[in-house]
Amino acid sequence: MRQRLALALSLSIILLGMIALTLGPAGISLTDTFLTLTGRARHASQTYIIFQLRLPRVLTAIFCGAILGSAGAVFQAVLRNPMADPFVLGVSSGASFGVALSITLGYATLLGLPFSALLGALLTTLLIFLVGSRHKVSQTTLLLTGVAANYILSAAMTLLMFLNHEQYDRILFWTLGSFSSSTWQQVTFMLLTTLVFLVPLSLSHKEMDMLLLDEGSALASGLPVQKIRILLLLLSTLAVATCVAFFGVIGFIGLMAPHMARLLVGPKHSRMLAPTCLVGSLLLLGSDTLARLVLPSGEMPVGVITSILGAPLFIWMLRKGRYAYV
């Protein structure tokens, strides 16, 4: 079942990637796309469009989707809340705020955007972890703490844009998310980030299963709960911050992908981590393709598409009471 599902999802990603490479104002056919990818392009312009503009965008969307989906699974396991997600809990907004603040204060060149994003995301994650590690804190309280952090950081971003009109466009980019400026250098960096994140994560599936137990049972089984929580949160925060530093805030992939994978293969992380990565890639690649085509001129930020898809799921889970593991 798992192998067939993984194969079906992988083939779907490849097919959608081919469609994404083909669709656009340049009018390249599917046959021309295939010929170009195999080194038999009919026109030099097609080679440039596919290899320099579209293919890096497709690959970064795939890697970023896998990271965000897997990070959502980590946050849900560590915080024992199936509604947890880097976007909902404000971690993505914290990374975005760190970037915007460094641009506003003129430290972007000194610190670098990835480090600024990481610092903002780490501080937000620390706040969530401190609240979540308190005894007798309900899942609803934890969720609302993250939502409140998200609102505060979004308001702070708006204030920075209002006070710095000359940096308005640069800051706005990190509030909406886009893959329009993807480069091969970013593809390489995102590939390395994906491997560094997913390899140790795949080796920690038993620990993630045990984190879903109550803390007393997890400790009794010999699991160093606090150490595992901190390591997994740090690893996920680093990966999410990398995505935000390059492509801005992209919401709800971390909520949708684990939830869909859980419905397909069950809650055990040994089964759901791989489908979560693939579903995240498929969702984000599809959202980015739609964002390129939905407007007659220009393109819509991909974060708008993912929010339109993810917000109804979030509301549905609230209405069904699916905000805690039972």
Image (cartoon, grey):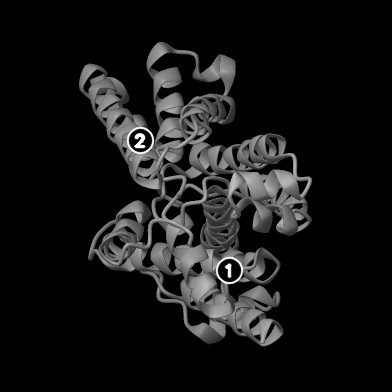
Q: Relative to residue 151, is residue 57 depicted above or below?
A: below
Q: In the rendered view, tell whether residue 224 sits above or below residue 111.
A: below
Label 1 with label 2: CB-CB less than 8 Å:
no
Occupied quadrant, residue 212: bottom right
At 45% across and 25% down in the image, what residue appears? Answer: 98
The image's mark for residue 145 is 2
Query: x, y percentage for residue 206?
Result: 74, 58
Q: Residue sitting at 57 percent across and 50 percent down? A: 71
Label 1 neighbourhood size at 10 Å, few (<14), some (14-19), many (20+)? some
Give the number of marks.
Answer: 2
- Of the pair 209 and 276, the residue shown nearer to us: 209
Q: x%, y% of residue 278?
A: 59, 69
Asked whether 181 or 59 is in front, the reply is 59
Q: Is residue 196 at least partly visible in the picture?
A: no
Q: Secondary structure at mark 2?
A: helix
Q: Amino acid at mark 1?
A: Pro
Image quadrant where residue 152 sits: top left
Q: Is residue 230 left or right of residue 29?
A: right
Where disc 1 sits, the SS reads: loop
Residue 131, disc = none
- Residue 117 appears at what percent x and percent y? 51, 30
Q: Position of residue 76 (x, y in %)?
A: 52, 52
Q: Amino acid at mark 2?
A: Thr
First-in-chain label (1 vs 2): 2
Residue in view at x 66 percent, y 35 percent: 226
- Res. 144 in view: yes
Q: Who is closer to the viewer here, 250 or 322? A: 322
Q: Quadrant of the N terminus?
A: bottom right
96 to the left or right of 317: right
Dot 1 corresponds to which residue? 267
x 59%, y 78%: residue: 265
